[in-house]
Image (cartoon, rainbow, N blue to C red):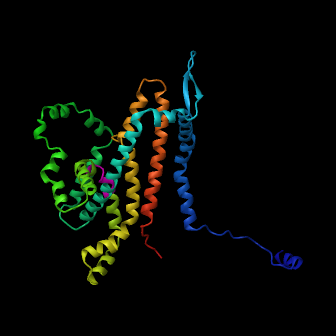
Amino acid sequence: MNAEAKLNTGKPAVIGKKTKPKSLDSRKARVGYIFVAPFLIVFLLVYVPIVFESIQYSFSYIVTRNSGGFDLDFVGFDNYNEALFINPDFIQTLTSGIKQLVIDIPAIVIFSLFIAVVLNQKMVGRTVFRAIFFIPVILATGIIEQIDISNAMMESMESTIDTGASSSASEIISVVDVQSLFTNMAVGTQLVQYVVQIVNDIYNIVNRSGVQMLIFLAGLQSISPAIYESCTVEGATAWETFWKITFPMISPMILVNSIYTVIDSFTSSSNQVMSFISTVYEDTASHSREIATAMSWMYFMIVILIIAAVSALVSAYVFYQRKD
């Protein structure tokens, strides 16, 4: 039969066409799509409609019906105008909040990188020290945070302590006399204020550095020891090794931690802008919820712009090691 087909057509008969086996990358991609499919389905069916309704509320007034339910009365940018130009506290709170985060975010990233480099060294009790620095992350989340906020016993104890004997960060500054130290070194006043604010906020910085420290530790442990051995053979100092090997190799983690710190700082329950928007939302004044929704969307756009700026700035100095 095959010979007859070959004679009739002049071409060899095709018995069976073999399919090209799929590559490992395509199979991994297919598994990845299957893995994220539940999230995408829930995102499209649940989250996107909620976001769309929130945008509608920010451009409308909610009018309650006498028979029950409500209608949306489109008012354009009136809610945004109320938040920006009529409410005197929103812009002030937003400005002060952004200024504080500009101070905290670099301090958190630098502090977590420093602690990660120290804890990556070979020393006794290294695992215990890592756990100690990560404990504040556990204590500052979920139910434990709410218990700490509503701890009546701690409030009672603090109220009975004499303010003259308290150990606040401002008194630590007065003891260490950082301002006088920098003044004698003829350093600019802006740098003095920046250092003083960081020391005043050191408790908050340490509490919010645990996740970043673990990410940096993972990046440091991924660096091949052979690279450090080559540096030692070549006679490089620890300072040169850090800036020419460790810092470039860890730069992708700096980008990740910078973005994570921005998002974590801007969405924290202790963030003063978030607290202010929640206060406006819970207010009983007319159209306060619609105005709070408009504030939330403006705050969201500002956060997106800051993330884009941080990503563009840090990405310019990120080094990616070639695997080939």
Q: Residue at x 46, y 37 (%)?
A: 84
Front residue (pair 62, 123): 62
- Does residue 107 appear anywhere in the picture? yes
Residue 221 x %, y %: 32, 67
Residue 182 x %, y %: 19, 59
In the image, 122: left or right of 306? left
Looking at this view, name the residue that lies furthest to the top: 66
In the rendered view, tell whether residue 260 sits above or below residue 290: below
In the rendered view, tell whether residue 48 sits above or below residue 120: above
In the image, 64: left or right of 112? right
In the image, 12: left or right of 198? right
Front residue (pair 99, 49): 99
Residue 210 x %, y %: 30, 53
Q: Residue at x 56, y 15 (%)?
A: 66
Q: Residue at x 27, y 35 (%)?
A: 149
- Magenta-highlighted residues: 206-213
Q: Residue at x 30, y 53 (%)?
A: 209
Is 209 covered by the magenta stretch? yes
